[in-house]
Image (cartoon, coloured by chain):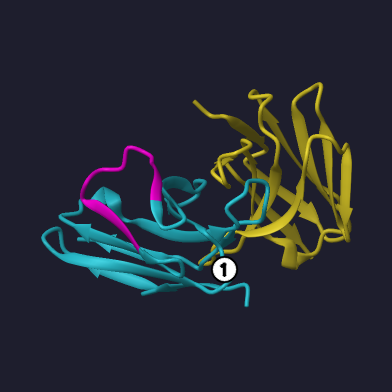
């Protein structure tokens, strides 16, 4: 199984809502990532988890809160988002060592209204 | 600051033709250079990757050419097919950083029948 599963596929939320994005992989990967992708732009790294610990936070606003409950799951908690946060949110996983394939999920298309 | 520069932004090729996408980088510490293919509404998927100790790598119709001295690498798609129409991202990563990718800006490829 080389799949990274993200739920939901689509999400519309108001600026005062709280919602969560979920990501799951069963490849035994110990590195997991959140990326944000705007239309016609490359993915931008947000967070990296290494062995369930947050190792990189690319200066992401606190309205985005990541969580890694175990080695297979990654969540992104959303609160008080702005319309400019509307984007495709991608989860990825890979082996911990560098220079290996990163597997991406299909993403969650988020719209903030 | 764009760590990896990619060109062209868009490319139209006839079916059966050769598609060529170029990337350049500045940081000589990069040690892994993947190409990702992304279809609309999907997450990126690894197409082919190369390390700087190799000048060329071929997988089926896809070839990476790597010029370490020029700090450039390129993707060649031979016998391009309409099903190859997608956005292609080059990327680079540093050693000992897991797979924290610096993505190029992307190339939208259209293969016309």
Q: Who's the residue at 75% across and 61% down the image? A: B112
- Chain letter matching colour cyan: A
Q: Is residue B91 left or right of residue A73?
A: right
Q: Does the magenta stretch mainly form a helix, a strand or a loop?
A: strand
Chain letter of disc 1?
Answer: A
Residue B97 seen anywhere in this rendered image of the structure? yes
Q: Is residue B112 magenta?
A: no
Q: Position of residue B56 (x, y in %)?
A: 88, 42
* Residue B105, quarter of the rendered image: top right
The quarter of the picture where residue A58 lies is top left
Residue drawn at (56%, 40%) of the image = B97
Looking at the image, which residue sits at the far bottom? A1
Q: Nearer the viewer, residue A57 or B91?
A: A57
Total labels drawn: 1
Q: Quadrant of residue A76?
A: bottom left
Horizontal relation, residue B28 to residue A45: left or right? right
In this image, A39 relative to A93: left or right?
left
Nearer to us in this view, B79 or A75: A75
Question: Which residue corresponds to the image point at 72% horizontal and 50% vertical from the top-left?
Answer: B12
Mark 1, residue position: A28
Question: Is residue A49 depicted above or below B4 in this figure?
Answer: below
Residue A17: x, y in percent? 14, 64
In the image, residue B69 sits, relative to residue A69, either above or below, namely: above
**In the rendered image, which quarter contains the C terminus of chain B?**
bottom right
Please say whether residue A55 is one of the residues in the magenta stretch: yes
Q: Which residues are magenta?
A: A54-68
Chain (yellow): B
B21 with respect to A5 (left or right): right
| Residue that appears at 57% across and 68% down | A28
Q: Secondary structure at mark 1?
A: loop
Identify which residue, B64 or B87, lies in the foreground: B64
Where residue A30 sits: x, y (%)?
A: 52, 59
């Amino acid at each position: 199984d080389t799949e990274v599963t993200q739920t939901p596929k689509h999400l519309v939320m108001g600026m005062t809502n709280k919602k969560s994005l979920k990501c799951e992989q069963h490849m035994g990967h110990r590195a997991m990532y959140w990326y944000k992708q705007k239309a016609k732009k490359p993915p931008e790294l947000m967070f990296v988890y290494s062995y369930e610990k947050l190792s990189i936070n690319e200066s992401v606003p606190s309205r985005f809160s990541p969580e890694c409950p175990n080695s297979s799951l990654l969540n992104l908690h959303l609160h008080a988002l702005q319309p400019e946060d509307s984007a495709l949110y991608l989860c990825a996983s890979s082996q911990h060592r560098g220079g290996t394939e990163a597997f991406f999920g299909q993403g969650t298309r988020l719209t903030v209204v | 600051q764009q760590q990896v520069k990619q060109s062209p932004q868009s490319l139209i090729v006839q079916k059966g033709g050769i598609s060529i996408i170029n990337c350049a980088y500045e940081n000589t510490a990069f040690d892994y250079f993947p190409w990702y293919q992304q279809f609309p509404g999907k997450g990126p998927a690894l197409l082919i990757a190369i390390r700087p100790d190799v000048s060329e790598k071929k997988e089926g119709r896809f070839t990476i050419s790597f010029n370490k001295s020029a700090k450039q690498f390129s993707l060649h798609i031979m016998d391009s097919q309409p099903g190859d129409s997608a956005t292609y991202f080059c990327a680079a990563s540093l050693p000992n950083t897991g797979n924290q990718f610096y993505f190029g800006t992307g190339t939208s490829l259209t293969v016309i029948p």
